[in-house]
């Protein structure tokens, strides 16, 4: 079976880039990305490709090549589903904020809405692909809804979790470590559907890297991969605190440990804490699933990854207060970086948000500069915490348009995102414009201690 029309529901950080690369590599397939968010679709269709809503290195080029050729962005969800042979569901699956499983379980209401819409609209057989990250056995619920509320057409459900990381999305999509496709391996129809999706990826991914498994293994592998990755960050962050107490240096420890080929060097960078929309949400979801099966030891094991991460963010902020003579009240503190990592404009669950909240509770005045994050996003992130009235966030937080303005007259500078441009700033100038003693806290191990101390900074870095 050859796929001619793909519809992707959800034009976010995953749907947009993933479909752009599929469209680029499969010129004979028409790909339509749909969303209920009209503003987002408008931005994807902006004449100036630099204004697309997701910032990712290399993405605007792929969009320029494919948009209106075989890649389309639309709010007409019904007709895109109707036309498609294959429908990807790539909507958000946030942590539940209400009811049973509040604060832990994944909220599947957007997924269910998609399933019901597909069932209502479809007049021909469809392959439905779970692209969103979902609790294991979600495919069962999807199938139930599709089969019982549909128009009698046949559905095959595949799980095809996405492993791209933000900031390197295009590169990760072009050269994935693996593509995972879970399906009904027992039936000929299931196998045919899996093959159809394998054929899409085989346009550019070597077959040896395309794995096919059962749906349940595929769904659970995604949660497992994120849990393992986050666990490495929490492991090295736990060691960073011990390094600070003992005179060891976490970068040296990470290097020594990572050269063991069984451990490997990647994902061992100590930081102010991991952020992003997924690690925390997916681990909480895993913890919830384990608990729901009565596997309390398994749940506790993974929950510790989150506990260390929360601790790391809090202790970084507490150290700022302690170092600034136990008070930051009325003091100007400059933040360099707000995004959860470099090369993205995404701020979801960024450690910077929690550090800011902690310092605002201590009555600090914060000035923030991030090369890709807009002021409205920063205020929205702070308001979302509900820690204080929105007006107070606007009164105590200002947004600067470069690092120099942010640092002027500041008591302290905090490096919270590892943007490359922070490495090459004129740090002498920044030092001269700050109040003295000039404190510099490196939450990302981005800067050279010796050079900064020579300039005159009182320098603190995670894990040394
Ligand atoms: P996102 O919030 O950026 O995008 C989701 C989009 O879905 C939104 O634009 C929203 O308006 C739209 N949407 C929600 N319900 C809809 C509906 N019923 N009909 C049409 N559109 C609807 O989310 P994201 O970051 O792209 O993540 C999507 C999924 O992919 C999540 O499950 C996430 O865990 C997973 N994932 C994310 C990443 C990542 O790097 N962000 C990586 C791998 C997997
Ligand atoms: C992560 C995974 O890497 C992807 O494979 C996965 O698809 C994605 O989650 C998802 O499911 O959403 P992402 O969150 O975009 O990708 O970015 P990462 O590079 O994993 O970084 C996550 C956080 O950990 C960032 O805040 C980063 O700064 C931090 N981190 C990462 C560290 O502090 N140290 C490290 O060594 C690595």
Image: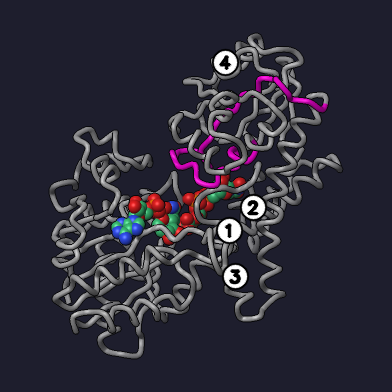
Q: Is the shortest distance between ligand 2 and the CB of mark 2 under 8 Å?
A: yes
Q: Which mark is residue 229?
A: 1
| Residue contact between numbered discs 1 and 3, judged by CB atoms under 8 Å | no
Look at the numbered discs 2 and 1 and tell me whether their residues touch, using CB distance below 8 Å: yes
Relative image position of residue 338 (x, y in whole percent): 53, 35
At mark 2, the secondary structure is: helix
Asked if marks 2 and 4 touch (Cβ < 8 Å), the reply is: no
The residue that disc 2 covers is 233
- Whether residue 14 appears in this view of the structure is no
Report the span colored magenta: 326-355
State the residue lying farthest toward the right: 246
* Main secondary structure along the magenta-highlighted residues: loop
> Which label sits on residue 426?
4
Identified at 51% across, 40% down, the residue is: 381
Tell me: 373 left or right of 184: right
N-term mark: 2 or 3: 2
Q: Is mark 3 within 8 Å of ligand 1?
A: no
- Res 197 quadrant in image: bottom left
The answer to the question of whether label 4 and label 3 lie on touching residues, with beta carbons closer than 8 A, is: no
**Nearer-N-terminus badge (4/3):** 3
Question: Helix, strand or loop at disc 1?
Answer: helix
């Amino acid at each position: 079976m050859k796929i001619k029309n793909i519809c992707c529901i959800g034009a976010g950080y995953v749907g947009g880039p993933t479909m752009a690369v599929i469209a680029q590599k499969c010129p004979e397939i028409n790909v339509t990305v749909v969303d209920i968010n009209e503003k987002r679709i408008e931005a994807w269709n902006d004449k100036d490709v630099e204004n697309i809503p997701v910032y990712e290195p290399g993405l605007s080029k792929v969009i320029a090549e494919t948009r209106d050729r075989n890649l389309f962005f639309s709010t007409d969800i019904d007709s895109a589903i109707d036309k498609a042979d294959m429908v990807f569901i790539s909507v958000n699956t946030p942590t539940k904020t209400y009811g049973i499983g509040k604060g832990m379980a994944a909220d599947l209401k957007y997924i269910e809405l998609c399933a019901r819409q597909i069932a209502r609209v479809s007049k021909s057989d469809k392959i439905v692909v779970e692209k969103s990250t979902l609790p294991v056995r979600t495919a069962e619920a999807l199938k139930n809804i599709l089969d019982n509320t549909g128009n009698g057409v046949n559905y095959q459900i595949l799980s095809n979790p996405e492993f791209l990381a933000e900031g390197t999305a295009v590169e990760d999509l072009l050269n994935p470590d693996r593509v995972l496709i879970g399906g009904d391996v027992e039936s000929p129809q299931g196998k045919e559907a899996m093959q159809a999706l394998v054929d899409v990826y085989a346009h550019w991914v070597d077959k040896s890297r395309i794995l096919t498994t059962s749906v349940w293994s595929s769904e659970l592998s995604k949660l497992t991969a994120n849990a393992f990755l986050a666990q490495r960050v929490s492991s090295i962050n736990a060691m960073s605190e011990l390094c600070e107490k003992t005179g060891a240096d976490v970068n040296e420890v990470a290097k020594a440990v990572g050269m063991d080929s069984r451990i490997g060097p990647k994902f061992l960078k100590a930081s102010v804490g991991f952020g992003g929309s997924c690690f925390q949400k997916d681990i909480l979801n895993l913890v919830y699933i384990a608990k729901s099966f009565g596997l309390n030891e398994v749940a506790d094991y993974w929950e510790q990854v989150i506990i260390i991460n929360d601790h790391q963010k809090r202790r970084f902020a507490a150290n700022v207060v302690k170092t600034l003579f136990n008070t930051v009240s009325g003091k100007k503190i400059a933040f360099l970086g707000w995004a959860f990592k470099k090369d993205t404009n995404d701020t979801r669950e960024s450690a910077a948000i929690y550090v800011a909240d902690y310092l605002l509770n201590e009555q600090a005045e914060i000035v923030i500069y991030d090369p890709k994050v807009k002021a409205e996003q920063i205020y929205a992130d702070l308001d979302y915490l509900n820690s204080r009235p929105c007006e107070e966030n606007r009164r105590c937080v200002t947004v600067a348009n470069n690092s120099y303005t942010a640092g002027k007259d500041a008591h302290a500078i905090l490096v919270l995102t590892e943007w490359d441009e922070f490495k090459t700033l004129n740090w002498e100038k920044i030092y001269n414009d700050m109040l003295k003693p000039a404190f510099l806290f490196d939450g990302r191990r981005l800067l050279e201690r010796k050079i900064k101390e020579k300039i005159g900074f009182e320098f603190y870095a995670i894990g040394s």
